[in-house]
Structures are given as C-alpha cells and as structure tokens.
C-alpha cells in the first residue's frame, strides 16, 4: 500500500508543478498529471484546452525536470472522455419541431416536383415524427 500512496503523492506534486507554470485560467483546466515510463501524461476535459496546453510543452517539461528521477522525453495531453464516468458538462437535448411543423414539412413536400427533394423532405418528416414519439 505504501507504494500506491507514494505514487499518488508523486502525481499530486507533478500536478502542482505543472499548474504553477501555466497561466491561471489554463492551470484550472489541468485535472490530473502522471508520469508513465518516460512520458508525462496531462489530463484535461476538452480538446480546446488540450490544444492550449500543448503550447506549453517545453515550459512544463522544464518545470518538472528537477522533480523527476528519470528524464521525461515527451508530454501527452489526453482528454477525459465520458467512458471514464466523469461527466463534467450536461448533455444537450435536440430541439424538435412541433407536430404541426412536421405536418407542414410532410404536406408541402408532396407538392414539390423535384423527386430527390421530395423524397428527402418526406424522410426528414418521418424521422422528426419518429424522434418526437408521435408515430
């Protein structure tokens, strides 16, 4: 157990060193850091923050160099996905049109002479009707 506690402490210290190098808004977006073999893994929750973190690659590696026992050769920024069970933002629900608007799309599509457009609008109205649960 002592080994695992020392690993946790090391990860906390690496996180503190990394956050100290970064500007405050960016530092708040770093969730976890760990050293795996000769790689520094930094976890954040969005691709936009990951992109910003990559700009600080050299500064981050220089900041943790005195702390680590082995030389770190590279840094990887990973995005925490929903599979981890950690959900940081709410899910958006589709905004579906009313039954009347779906009926307008379906009825107006019957009067269109272009067969391809007619078929596309009929499929759209069928899909919207199915998604709204009014079938």
Image: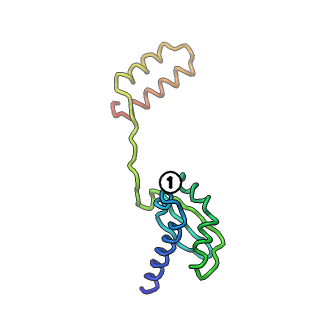
In this picture, residue 16 sits left or right of residue 58: left
Question: Can you give x and y, in whole percent of width and height, for residue 68 in the image?
Answer: 58, 79
Residue occupying image coordinates x 38% and y 49%: 90
Above or below 70: residue 44: above
Name the quadrant of the N terminus: bottom left
Residue 101 rendering spot, x and y as whole percentages = 38, 22
Is residue 9 something one can see in this rendering?
yes
Position of residue 63 measured from the top left corner of the image (x, y, whole percent): 58, 72
Quadrant into which the C terminus falls: top left
- The residue under the point 35% across, 22% down is 100
Residue under the image location 57 percent in, 22 percent down: 116
Mark 1 element type: loop
Q: Can residue 80 be seen here?
A: no
Q: Return the residue found at the far right.
A: 73
Residue 105, above or below 88: above
For disc 1, the marked residue is: 46
């Amino acid at each position: 157990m002592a080994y695992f506690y020392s690993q946790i402490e090391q990860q906390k210290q690496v996180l503190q060193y990394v956050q100290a190098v970064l500007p405050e808004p960016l530092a708040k977006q770093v969730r976890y850091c760990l050293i795996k073999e000769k790689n520094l893994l930094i976890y954040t929750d969005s691709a936009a923050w990951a992109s910003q973190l990559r700009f600080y690659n050299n500064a981050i590696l220089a900041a943790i160099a005195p702390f680590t026992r082995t030389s770190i050769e590279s840094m990887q920024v990973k995005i925490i996905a929903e599979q981890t069970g950690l959900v940081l933002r709410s899910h958006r629900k589709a905004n579906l049109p009313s039954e009347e608007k779906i009926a307008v799309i379906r009825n107006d599509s019957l009067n269109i002479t272009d067969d391809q457009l007619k078929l596309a609008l009929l499929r759209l109205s069928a899909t919207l009707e199915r998604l709204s649960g009014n079938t």
